[in-house]
Amino acid sequence: QVQLVESGGGFVQAGGNTRLSCAASGRTFSTYDMGWFRQAPGKEREFVAAIGWSSVTIYYVDSVKGRFTISRDNAKNTVYLQMNRLQPEDTALYYCAGRLRSLGSSSRSYYTDGDKYDYWGQGTQVTVSS
């Protein structure tokens, strides 16, 4: 069983930056694809970014391209989401998700579909004030 714990959320002014971290338990983190998702009040969960186990495959939702950067440090069992130039519409509960690496499909949909992930963190709130 893999446990994921997010941290780094909080209140940020519009235009500001912050970084989310997701620490994973276990010894097999390097074999996991990881993703970040978010859910705003009254809205459905939304894909934000994903990174494959080898860091070769990376995807972003269009609304964060050029502002957010996903990365991972396998030695620290941690995946990060650097969030720059934050906007009020980025306000949401941000979740980290993981699954054993895909040895087959590497299509975008396989990374953006939350139902394809097996493990989820408890979420960390990011609130961007205008």
Image (cartoon, rainbow, N blue to C red):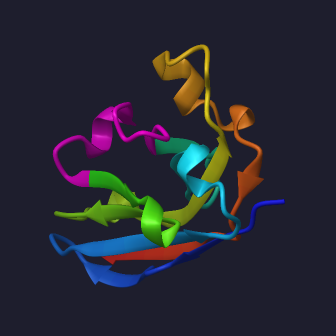
Asked if 33 appears above or below 6 in the picture, the reply is: above
Question: Which image quadrant for residue 110?
Answer: top right
Q: Nearer the viewer, residue 66 or 63?
A: 66
Residue 28 within the magenta-colored segment of the rendering: no
Question: Which image quadrant for residue 57?
Answer: top left
Residue 35 is left or right of residue 75, and the answer is right
Q: Residue at x 68, y 70 (%)?
A: 25
Q: Residue at x 39, y 64 (%)?
A: 80
Question: Which image quadrant for residue 65?
Answer: top left
Q: Position of residue 118 (x, y in %)?
A: 77, 44
Q: Residue at x 45, y 79 (%)?
A: 9
Q: Position of residue 63 (x, y in %)?
A: 30, 40
Asked if 62 appears above or below 16 in the picture, the reply is: above
Q: Position of residue 23 (x, y in %)?
A: 56, 72
Q: Which residues are magenta?
A: 49-68
Residue 50 within the magenta-colored segment of the rendering: yes
Q: Position of residue 94 (x, y in %)?
A: 53, 63
The answer to whether one can see residue 63 in this image is yes
**Which quadrant does the N terminus fall into?**
bottom right
Asked if 113 appears above or below 16 in the picture, the reply is: above
Q: Residue at x 53, y 69 (%)?
A: 22
Residue 2 is left or right of residue 34, and the answer is right
The answer to whether one can see residue 130 in this image is no
Count all numbered tags in the image, as a single digit.
Answer: 0
**Which quadrant does the C terminus fall into?**
bottom left
Q: Nearer the viewer, residue 10 or 104?
A: 104
Residue 66 is left or right of residue 43, and the answer is left
Residue 64 is left or right of residue 50, and the answer is left
Residue found farthest to the bottom? 11
Q: Nearer the viewer, residue 11 or 73?
A: 73
